Image (cartoon, rainbow, N blue to C red):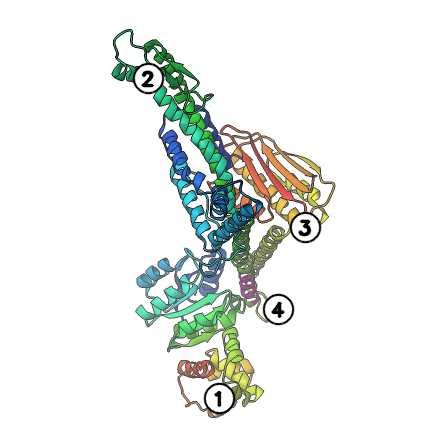
Amino acid sequence: MGLPARTPAADPSSGDRRRGRRSWRSAPPLTRRAAREVVFCLAGLPFIVFNPVAFFVVAVDLSWWISRGARGNPTATDVAVAVISVGVLLVLLVSTTAARRLGTLHRRLAARLLGVRVAPPPVPAGPTWSGLRDGAGWRVVGYLLAKLPVSLIALYALFFWVGGLLNLSYPLLWGAFRNHPPGVRLDPVPVFTPFGLFGDGTFRVATLGGTFAAAAAGAAMLLAAPWVTRAVASTDGWLIRGLLGPGRLARRVHDLELSRASAVDDAAALLRRLERDLHDGAQIRLATLAMNLGMARRKLGDGDEVADAAAVRELVDAALRGAKDALADLRSLTRGIHPPVLDNGLADALASLAADSAIPVRLDTGIPVRPTPAIETIAYFCAAELLANAAKHSFATTITVRVAGKRAKLWLSVADDGTGGADPSRGTGLSGLAQRVAVVDGTLRIASPPGGPTTVTVELPLRA
Amino acid sequence: MSVRVVIAEDAALFRAGLTRLIEEDGHQVCAAVGDGDLLLAAVREHQPDVVVADIRMPPTHTDEGLRAALEIRRRHPGTGVLVLSQYIETRYTARLLQGNAAGVGYLLKERVADVAEFADALKRVATGGTALDPEVVGQLLRVSRRADGVAALTPRERHVLALMAEGRSNAGVADALVVTGGTVEKHVASIFDKLGLPPDEADNRRVLAVLRYLSS
């Protein structure tokens, strides 16, 4: 399907993913991105405290302290009181939209520092009191809960940076502050590694030589640190995408709105094109035909003698041509609206399409269950458009059309051995097809590297 | 009588046919163009008696022919404008007539099949008369809020009213109905009396009076 395009284009989202993976693998440790991720981890730390779990612990302790002066052990009553008060607090958070605002804060942090842009959940109609059934608010609470372990790991990730820097600075510090005369016994300093306790370090060094070992450990930690913070930031980004976004239902509604809008536009455009085709085609041909016949009739006169038989013949000939042209016009138009051969099934329709193609087409159909007419029509027009594209742009010598029905899906693939480089962002053909397919929740994938070959795969549900 | 004509029509075949038809009728086609701008230029250059223009032409394929026609009416009051279209729009009729039915025509394209009728309409518009498609008149009669006034007419009178509103003279109406001029005059007088319109001699003013009556 080589549309004349140089960009190796395909599904843009897969391109992004590829880019993202590459930078994950090859990013140098100390980049702006790493710095932003550290800031993101730092910004998340307050939420270790501002967390339903922390609230619960504090509530239990408060109840325990108030009821019995923090003597003995907290009782089941204390736990119950804490559960109720944290519950009330969460209900307040959600119903006053404070939870939503917290979600906004996190989304903004993620957008600013991680470049993770998540659309806000749809705003419920009505006043600020959103009530208890605000799913988006509750998902923020879920996010806060899920963020607790992530934040704890973030703390650990930050320790990589702090501990590493500290280790690295030991040789300097030793020279600056431990420059005692020989014979003085010095306290050893702890060396921090990921495996030791934070304060104590894993081992201690007490000599200048030892500090270099510490520095080496620090350098290793600093090299590892960006990856750890990145892991934390990515996990958090994943949580934010999953919990602070519009939600699956809202996203689905949004997608459906988009596809409905495009279906409506499509239908309107189709009617407009139809009117235009009729107006500029059959209608004007018939008007011309009528005019020619009118002129011929006048030349025939009312008597038996025809003065200018040649002119009459010419006019009637023109009228005849006009009638044939008008018929041809109407035939191609009706075929464009609904090809009658489709009534016999997709396989027959595709076979007649293949027979009309300028480039030889190999057809391979296996459709055990007949799709609904709407799906057949979409598949047919996809195939027609893709074949036309291939004929126009690809310089291919053969085209292979495969149709297969399996697992409640209809797969249509049109492959050519042409020059490739088909790009949906150029021209309306491919993107128009993708829109049409999306209306029934289908997908259209294009693989068309420059130089070819091009394969376009359309996946449609069997019924719509 | 030979009139000088400029044609504007974007469909080449139809344009060629129209040119031939008009020339065979003994008129002179000064220019045959394909869009509104060229039409205005041709009218400036040739100062024709009448312009035959398609409404829908490039570049926008909406109403450039109509806009060009209105422009011609404004700038060259002596040039008649006969607008052809594949469908009749009441809104277009109103814009075309705008208080003056002299030298205006609005016909469906298919009317050219009746060569004599078309030639007659062309001549009428070229000489300051009116030629409205029966479809236009029919539409006005259908939607007119003066239904009671129209209902007071006999079927014959209603027929005369329709032909009159198309822009025909008494003689033209008489030809179409195959009656004598005197009979038509009697009908017309009766119609004007029943509708409460002041009788007017000039055909195009008479058309306007009837149209105004029907569309008010």
Residue that badge 1 annotates: B188
Q: Which amino acid does label 1 sit on?
A: Val
The residues bearing labels 1 and 3 have C-alpha atoms spaced at a distance of: 60 Å
The vertical placement of A298 against A284, above or below, is below
The residues bearing labels 4 and 2 have C-alpha atoms spaced at a distance of: 124 Å
Left or right, A353 with respect to B133, comes to right
Which is more foreground, mark 3 or mark 4? 3
Which chain is indicated by disc 1? B
Q: What residue type is labelled 4?
A: Asp
Say which mark, if any, is on residue A170.
2
Residue A204 location (% of width, % of height): 40, 15
Residue B116 location (% of width, % of height): 51, 71
Q: Which amino acid does label 3 sit on?
A: Pro
Question: Where does the magenta region start and end?
Answer: A287-297
Say which mark, if any, is on residue A304.
4
Q: Are marks 4 and 2 in contact (CB under 8 Å)?
A: no
Estimate how packed mark 3 is, as few (under 14), some (14 to 19) or many (20 or more) residues with alpha carbons within 10 Å. Answer: some
